[in-house]
Amino acid sequence: MRRRWVIGSWMACWLAASAWSPVRAHDVRAVDLALVIAVDVSTSMDREERILQHEGFAGAFEDSSVIGAIAEGPHGRIAVTYFEWAGNTRQRLIMPWTIIDGAQSSENFAARLRQRIPGTMDGGTAIGTALLYGVGLLDAKPFFADRNVINLSGDGVNNRGADLDAARTAALSRGITINGLAIVYKDMMEGLVEVVEPVSPEVLIDYFDTEIIGGTGAFVEPVTALENYSQSIRRKILREIQDPRQLASR
């Protein structure tokens, strides 16, 4: 019964992604990286944190080192999509697939992202379902990518929705790399009444490392303090753009 539910959930995510990702003639080009940014906006993330997270991703695409890293790739362009997630039925596409091939398109992406107000959604923390939604976006992308990556942020463990291990396996079987932005400067899911005892930052990082991330060059980038959001996100985006296979050969 669980297997049937997971497959049905994945198909629903794929159809949702297809509806938001129409094929455009200028998009049918190879890119170095197809990057899905999946941001946690569950109720454990307060307003200040959601704004800092949102601004951190927008600011990363204005950074000269990020723009330069994109230009240095074999194709000189990447594609990015951005969605918010929380509970099992709580996914909201914010930015559809966008080709970034220089300073202008990167800054335009940041400007359009800033026009959207970061949301908040309830229903728990459905990491498995968020991963399946990201897989659906990648399956429906209207171009070829040398690498496919899901960049997932979160401040808690999976407690709703699709089975996390099955969702992770579905992503890895397609050659998708899953990276984690672990928000660890506070007790995991702080402020929620169902949390009986606090969980240390080390435990959350280990959870991301063993239960969530996977694939070629997978890594966890921790956010260790409120004021570190921007630099942690910029560092993570930069590392994802720089092909780990090329870096290893230098």
Image (cartoon, rainbow, N blue to C red):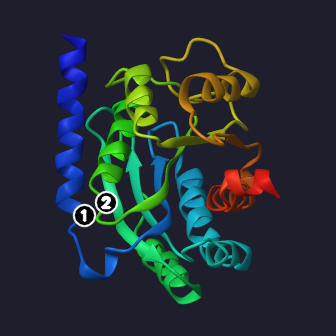
Q: Is residue 20 left or right of residue 189?
A: left
The reply to whether the C-beta atoms of the residues labelled 1 and 2 are less than 8 Å apart is yes
The answer to which of marks 1 and 2 sits earlier in the sequence is: 1
Q: Is residue 182 above or below residue 119?
A: above
Q: Which residue is mark 2?
A: 141
- For the N terminus, give its image quadrant: top left
Q: Amino acid at mark 2?
A: Lys
Q: Is residue 92 above or below residue 144?
A: above
Q: Nearer the viewer, residue 93 or 192?
A: 93
Q: Residue at x 56, y 37 (%)?
A: 215
Q: Is residue 26 above or below residue 116?
A: below
The x and y percentages for residue 249 are 78, 54
Q: Nearer the viewer, residue 63 or 48?
A: 63
The x and y percentages for residue 68 are 69, 78
Whether residue 232 is visible, yes or no, is: yes
Residue 3 tag number:
none
Q: Nearer the viewer, residue 50 or 142?
A: 142
The x and y percentages for residue 109 are 47, 77
Q: Secondary structure at mark 1?
A: loop
Name the residue at the front extreme: 249
Q: Amino acid at mark 1?
A: Ser
Q: Residue at x 45, y 46 (%)?
A: 41
Res 227 quadrant in image: bottom right
Q: Is residue 227 left or right of residue 212?
A: right
Q: Which residue is mark 1?
A: 21
Res 66 quadrant in image: bottom right
